[in-house]
Amino acid sequence: MANTIRVRAVSSGEVTEVQALVQHPMDSGFVKDAQGNLIPPHHIEVVEFQHAGKTVFTALWGPAVAKDPYVKFSFKGAQKGDDISVSWADNKGESDSLVAKIL
Amino acid sequence: MPTQIRPDRMRRLILKSAIAGLVSGFGIGWWPKVARAADAAQWPKDPFTQKSEADAIKALYGKEAEASDKVKLDAPEIAENGAVVPISVSSTLPDVTSIAVMVTENPFPLAASYKIPPGTLGMVSNRLKMAKTSKVVALVESNGKIYSATKEVKVTVGGCGG
């Protein structure tokens, strides 16, 4: 299965900065196709980031988040070499997840 | 004279030790690296389907926001492409528990909401779609109160397909 998630998490001192880029159409439901029919909404609803079994960030997205969404946040308590996991679920029941190492 | 262990006690002892050994083996590093799936059930449909900024704030937080200079919203003055508008929210307020971003002129003003547990910083960067020139509102929840910052972003090419 092609992975839709790219993550870069870098630890500096006690703060880890996480950037994630997810491949997803994020169709808002307001755009028409060539035939003039509305393309139904298809967007990520929830993105969860976890470290050491604890959720460190949750993104709740509506259709107004841009296509191929990018998000950046920072948290404390992790260090280089730790795992960070990212997983998303969309309004059509699709999902994907990834575990990455903190640099 | 050593006491002889009865067979059923011996069986229990072996079983207990085996289980203890198994459980202790599942320490950190042993557990398979599987991300726990995000649960779409936690998506709050009500705030995301409100058609006005005020209704969306009410549905999301149940209270009104007060403008604060402790909330910083970075957004471009002019967004050439309304389909991808980068924004950043940060705050010097203590104990931030959530951040939300609204685009007031969008059909559904609430664009995104973020849950910030203890230990996570009160800041987020993201990219939004803006239908047209609009106010962008950043809301930060700190110690149960909601604070906001607003910025007008001009959009030259709308983000909803024209």
Image (cartoon, rainbow, N blue to C red):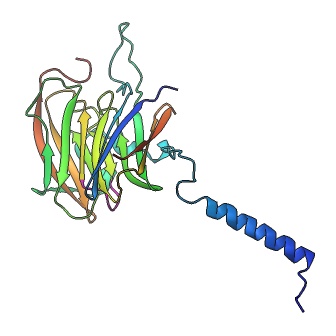
Inspect this view and state whether residue B41 appears: yes
Which residue appears at 32% of the width and 48% of the height?
B114
User: B33 and A64: which one is in front?
Assistant: B33
Which residue appears at 48% of the width and 44% of the height?
B38
Instruction: Quadrant for the N terminus of chain B, please.
Output: bottom right
On the image, the x and y values in percent for residue A21 come to 33, 33
User: A74 and A38: which one is in front?
Assistant: A74
The verdict on residue B117 being magenta is yes
Please state if A87 lies on the left or on the right of B117 as rendered: right
On the image, the x and y values in percent for residue B121 come to 26, 56
Instruction: Quadrant for the C terminus of chain B, please.
Output: top left
User: B124 and A97: which one is in front?
Assistant: A97
Q: Which is the main secondary structure of the residues drawn in magenta?
A: loop
On the image, the x and y values in percent for residue B25 come to 63, 60
User: What segment is highlighted magenta in the picture?
Assistant: B116-122
Instruction: Name the image quarter holding residue B86.
Output: top left
Inspect this view and state whether residue B57 appears: no
Vertical placement of residue B139 versus A92, above or below = below
On the image, the x and y values in percent for residue B43 come to 43, 44
Which residue appears at 12% of the width and 57% of the height?
B68
Please state if A90 lies on the left or on the right of A68 as rendered: right
